[in-house]
Image: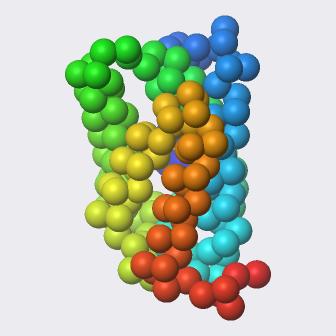
Amino acid sequence: MYILINALYLIAGFTWGDWRNWKKYYPTILFLITGDFLYNFLLYNKSMWLFHDLILPNHTLITILAMTVSYTATVLIYLGRFPEEWKKRSLWFLLWFGIYITIEYINSKLGFITYHNGWNMWWSAIFTGIIFFILPIHHKRPLLAWGISIGIIISLLSIFDVNISYMK
């Protein structure tokens, strides 16, 4: 399933992504990837969600595939075509939020993602909204985005009672 999803992201990325200006989006691609690495590292012993697949053998390989393919394509399309007008920005945000949530919902119903330790589809929806809200902020004002992200990380660690003892 995840190979198919990433193949579709790859095609979409090459079709609609702003590859000509990839260098200006590169820091935001790394920001998104770093966030996922932080999740996988900080919550190694207390995962909120885990990916499963018929072909790829484990969560780690699925996540690395998503980081390299899906996140890169997402940023190149989402920011590369980010509208100037606020109304269009809202619709663009809702489109991408809908794409990510629909894929996750289908994957959860098919058993390709499982939730743990109090996480659920509603938390994923909130988190997905935050991601698509913060990507354009990072693109224009990276330090502000990092500050917001650190606050969100600390809040989520507190909400989900992730103690330092859970960490590696």
Count up the numbered dots: 0
Nearest the eye: 27 or 77: 27
Q: At 60% across and 87% down in the image, what residue appears? A: 163
Q: Quadrant of the C terminus?
A: bottom right
- Name the residue rendered at 28%, 22% in the picture: 86
Q: Residue at x 61, y 49 (%)?
A: 146
Where 121 sits versus 21, above or below? Answer: below
Q: Does residue 160 sit above or below 98 in this rendering? A: below
Q: Residue extending furthest bottom?
A: 165
Residue 103: % across, % down? 37, 46
| Residue 151 locus on image (x, y percent) | 52, 62
Using the rendered view, name the quadrant where residue 45 is placed: bottom right
Q: Tell me the colour scheme of the image.
A: rainbow
Viewer-closest of 46 and 58: 46
88 w.r.t. 46: above or below = above
Q: Is residue 60 visible?
A: yes
Task: Locate residue 120 relative to residue 6 in the image: left or right.
Answer: left
Location of residue 75 in the rendering, given as x and y in whole percent from the top left corner: 55, 30
Q: In the rendered image, is residue 63 in sight?
A: no
Res. 76 image quadrant = top right
Q: Which one is nearer the viewer's eye here, 138 or 34?
A: 138
Residue furthest top as drawn: 20
Q: Residue at x 56, y 43 (%)?
A: 144
